[in-house]
Image (cartoon, grey):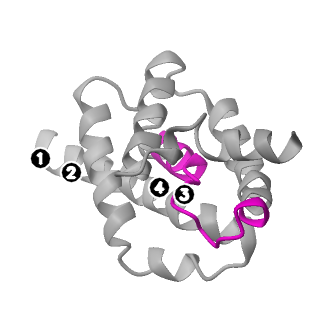
Amino acid sequence: MRKNFIVLLASGFGLGLIPKAPGTFGTLLGLVLAVLFPDNIFLITGIAVLGIWICQEAEKTLQEHDSPKIVVDEIAGYLIAVYTWDGIYLIIGFLLFRFLDILKPAPINRLQRLPGGLGVMADDLAAGLITNIIMKAAVFVFLT
């Protein structure tokens, strides 16, 4: 039962079990959470910190490193990407975060080499942070 609960949490309540684009569906859950609980640093921190342990345990249960079924990392990363943003920026953040998460440019790609749950989470947390910084820079350059 404990293993099922871990997989349930790691998979974003089953969204990671969708065969096509599970990471995108996990990010959609992040979008819903961002709308329902905007700029909730406690939620973001909780998912990010607990996510490391959840990913670690889910990898053991699924017997697969960084399984596509694990999407709690996308949820946390997206919440970081849109922290302090609202409106259309939630969609822009969604698209930019997914782009960076899929492409995994350096140094994001190196973070996956970290062991266990930390490696699963770290690249998405970095993609979220970089997304947020890019959006802030773009708004500063083009809209101020």
The numbered mark at residue 109 is none
Kindly report which numbered mark, 1 or 3, lies closer to the viewer in this rendering. 3
Element marked by disc 2: helix
Q: The residue under label 4 is which amino acid type?
A: Leu
Going by the image, does 102 lie left or right of 75?
A: left
> How far apart are the alpha carbons under marks 2 and 4?
14 Å
Image quarter of residue 121: bottom right
The numbered mark at residue 138 is 2
Tag 2–tag 4 contact (CB < 8 Å): no
Q: Earlier in the sequence, mark 2 or mark 4?
A: 4
Element marked by disc 1: helix
Give the crowd class for mark 3: few <14, some 14-19, many >=20 residues within 10 Å.
many
Q: Picture coordinates of residue 68 (x, y %)? A: 51, 60
Q: Earlier in the sequence, mark 1 or mark 4?
A: 4
Give the crowd class for mark 2: few <14, some 14-19, many >=20 residues within 10 Å.
few
Q: Earlier in the sequence, mark 2 or mark 3?
A: 3
> How far apart are the alpha carbons under marks 1 and 4?
20 Å
Q: Which residue is mark 3?
A: 125
Kindly report which numbered mark, 2 or 4, lies closer to the viewer in this rendering. 4
- Stretch in magenta: 59-79
